[in-house]
Image (cartoon, rainbow, N blue to C red):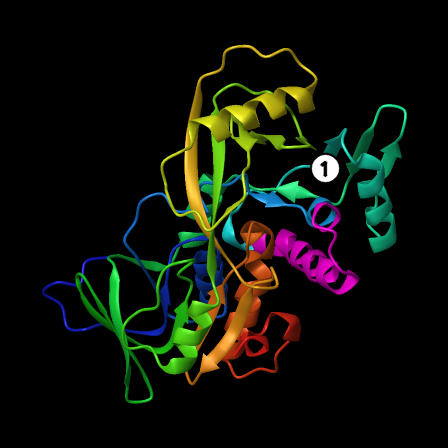
């Protein structure tokens, strides 16, 4: 959406950042009848460099989450069917699998957390019907439908009357509410201390994946050091978690180690593949759960989902949309006040 040669436009809500959290928030706000704009410079972001896992069972077991945190992931998953139907996102997958490694320990964690699963100790395989996935490229297109996307970089945000004025590289926009979905980026100029403090809590984590045109699996298969999942007509191999790293240049050594682990997980002999290796940088909070909610009048954050942005997107979107409407906090565990 070009802004030049136009009066400064006004929206109900301006979202800064077109990753999964920003787009989910925009889509939810649009569903509630709000006039929404998303400001983003474009290009490949961390949400596109992802497998699109909607995986509360596996993620809770792998990260050994507390029952309270696991319930957050489960609640997020439960929102996805209706959210996907409303936004045109394709949600699919009826089984996810873990092979080898500490599979017995993971099965015990799933049992303790109440996730449906089947553990075959003889084969060293653990499956669950509770996890699904989306394909990020298709999902991001669906989420952006009906939302004004301003292809620009946000430069400064400042209070303007009872709302906000956001200066961008193509002009300024106004909004009653401003949502920061800026990933691990530095705080915008002009933010109040509460906004700056929230953004300062976020640390970067680089993730690397490989896109393969060949269909290697028909469902998500995980194991020590790698996963392989369907992606469109092909597959995705992932993923590293590299705290503190910001480079978007794939690391050849780490990618090759991940590929070797993927062949081990699949129990197949390595063979040549054409792989498009990519790197993206996500944001994480100190406790690993995202921040979602209001930090100052009319200023809201959707930040720090670590590697669960796709899973948590609709839940974070609902929390942010509720905050713009003055509703009670539905997910106190995610509220930014725990850090501020």
Viewer-proximal residue among 257 and 99: 257
* Residue 41 part of the magenta segment: no
Give percent across and percent down for residue 117: 84, 41
Please provide the residue range marked out in magenta: 60-85
* CA neighbours of label 1 inside 10 A, class few (<14), some (14 to 19), many (20+): few
Residue visible at 76% across and 31% down in the picture: 101
Give percent across and percent down for residue 136: 49, 42
Q: Is residue 337 above or below residue 17?
A: below
**Residue bearing the label numbered 1:** 94
* Residue 81 part of the magenta segment: yes
Q: Quadrant of the N terminus?
A: bottom left
Give percent across and percent down for residue 220: 66, 32
Image quadrant assignment for residue 2? bottom left
Give percent across and percent down for residue 262: 61, 24
| Residue 1 relative to residue 84: left or right | left
| Residue positioned most to the bottom | 161
């Amino acid at each position: 959406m070009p802004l030049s040669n136009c009066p400064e436009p006004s929206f109900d809500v301006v979202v800064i950042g077109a990753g999964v959290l920003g787009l989910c928030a925009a889509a939810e706000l649009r569903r509630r009848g709000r006039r929404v704009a998303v400001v983003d410079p474009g290009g490949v972001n961390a949400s596109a460099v992802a497998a699109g896992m909607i995986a509360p069972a596996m993620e809770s077991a792998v990260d050994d989450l507390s029952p309270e945190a696991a319930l957050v992931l489960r609640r997020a998953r439960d929102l996805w069917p209706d959210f996907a139907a409303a936004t045109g996102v394709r949600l699919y997958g009826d089984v996810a699998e873990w092979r080898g490694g500490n599979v017995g320990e993971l099965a015990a964690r799933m049992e303790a957390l109440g996730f449906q699963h089947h553990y075959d100790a003889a084969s060293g395989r653990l499956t669950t019907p509770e996890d699904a996935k989306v394909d990020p490229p298709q999902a991001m297109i669906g989420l952006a439908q009906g939302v004004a996307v301003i292809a620009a970089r946000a430069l400064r945000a400042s209070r303007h009357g009872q709302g906000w004025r956001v200066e961008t590289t193509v002009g300024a926009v106004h909004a009653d509410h401003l949502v920061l979905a800026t990933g691990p980026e530095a705080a915008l100029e002009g933010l109040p201390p509460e906004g700056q403090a929230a953004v300062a809590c976020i640390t970067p984590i680089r993730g690397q994946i490989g896109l393969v045109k060949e269909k290697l699996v028909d469902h998500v298969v995980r194991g020590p050091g790698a996963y392989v999942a369907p992606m469109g007509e092909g597959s995705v191999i992932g993923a590293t978690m590299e705290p503190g790293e910001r480079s978007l240049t794939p690391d050849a050594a780490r990618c090759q180690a991940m590929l070797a682990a993927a062949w081990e997980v699949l129990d197949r002999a390595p063979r040549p593949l054409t792989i498009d290796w990519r790197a993206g940088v996500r944001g994480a909070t100190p406790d690993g759960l995202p921040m979602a909610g209001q930090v100052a009048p009319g200023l809201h954050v959707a930040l720090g989902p670590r590697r669960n942005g796709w899973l948590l997107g609709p839940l974070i979107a609902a929390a942010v949309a509720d905050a713009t409407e003055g509703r009670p906090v539905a997910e106190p565990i995610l509220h930014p006040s725990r850090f501020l």
